[in-house]
Amino acid sequence: MTGLRNHLRRRIALEGPLTVARYMEECLGNPRHGYYMTRDPLGRAGDFTTAPEISQMFGELIGLWAAVQWRAMGGPGAVHLVELGPGRGTLMADALRAAGQVPEFRAAAHVHLVETGPVLRERQRETLATAHPDVAPKWWNDLSQVPDGPAIAIANEFFDALPIRQFLRGPDGWRERLVGWDEDAGGLAFVRSGAQPTTPLIPPPLDAAPEGGVVEICPAGLRKAHTLAARLAAQGGAALIVDYGHDRSAPGDTLQAVKGHEYAGVLDDPGDVDLTAHVDFQQLANVCIRAGAATFGPVGQGDFLSALGIRERAAALTARAGEDQRADIEAALDRLTGADQMGRLFRVLAVQHPRLPRPSGFEQAV
């Protein structure tokens, strides 16, 4: 039995069953046993691969997008370039290299990385020190700690890892899904709360889910989105949120676990698997608008990258590559933009100061 499983069993014995959100918080962020506290989960040797690790093209285009946004902001002499959940630092390294094409932006950008995992912080430090020894990034545990001032923020596969709460609609109304301990099975198990929620946590249209429906709410994600949007509305700037999810709120159980690039049981190995849930972009956009920001999208990642010129960038890289490299570039292009791969499932939402012009990549977006 893992250390975290023992800890969870004791906690459940003392406090009763945990919400799914508290279970995720423990599994991902427990100081001693949490998944993101103890490892670098990325790459072939890890559990999953993100877009920046697939190809340099992803980070390069986002870096140029940031430079265009900076110009639209009036080219402030100092701007915070913030990444939420920066992985190994690959996206930021590629973005800064591409931003070198706009030297004024590159000089104005102060890099801030919002990361809680010590192992990943060290990987980010190594990546940026090697690629950009002139950059002095600062690390923070939360966006609220980043100093005041205009900002351009990137959140790639950040919101999907934030803890969710799940509710099930039965014949007697809503009940929250909880994680308890099954003594007979000797393991964790899902159970239902004995009482209906006392607060209106389930917003429309999710409250109209049919009997048997499962609804997911991400309070932490909505709080962070509100903080981000309110900051941009008050101090200026723009943000890109890239993640897998759905454009419109809908019932459904999307909580999943991944280990070794394969799906795993959500309750089987706490602290040793990645836990995520699909992002509800409608809820995210609504809270950003209420905070005073403007939103565009979401649009498919494939459409967004294509509008920014990923095919032209791939052609330029292919023109000076060897045969094996050309095949890798073409495979990466297909994986990032293909409708049957990341191109459609992954969505991109822009959040920005309401007086800024429509951002690049969202020319056709609502």
Image: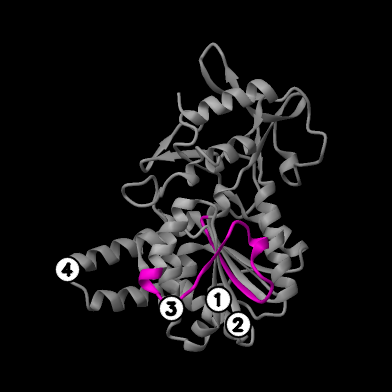
Residue carrying label 3: 134
Quadrant of res 68: bottom right
Relative to 51, residue 175 above or below: above
**Residue 46: horizontal and vertical position, in percent?**
36, 46
Which amino acid, mark 4? Glu
Disc nearer the start of the sequence (1/2)? 2
Quadrant of res 282: bottom right
Q: Mark 4 against mark 3, which lies toward the viewer? A: 3
For image coordinates 40% across by 73% down, the residue present is: 310
Q: Which residues are magenta?
A: 129-157
Q: Mark 1 against mark 3, which lies toward the viewer? A: 3
Circle 4/circle 2 CB separation < 8 Å: no
Residue carrying label 2: 78
- Distance, label 2 to label 3, CA atoms, is 16 Å
Q: Nearer the viewer, residue 256 or 63?
A: 63
- Neighbor class of circle 3 (other Cα within 10 Å; few <14, some 14-19, many 20+) is few
Circle 1/circle 3 CB separation < 8 Å: no
**Residue 49: horizontal and vertical position, in percent?**
39, 52
Is residue 224 a member of the stretch shown in magenta? no
- Neighbor class of circle 1 (other Cα within 10 Å; few <14, some 14-19, many 20+) is some
Circle 1/circle 2 CB separation < 8 Å: yes
Q: Mark 4 against mark 2, which lies toward the viewer? A: 2
Residue carrying label 4: 323
**Marker disc for residue 110:** 1
| Residue that protrudes farthest toward the top in the picture | 184
- Distance, label 4 to label 3, CA atoms, is 34 Å
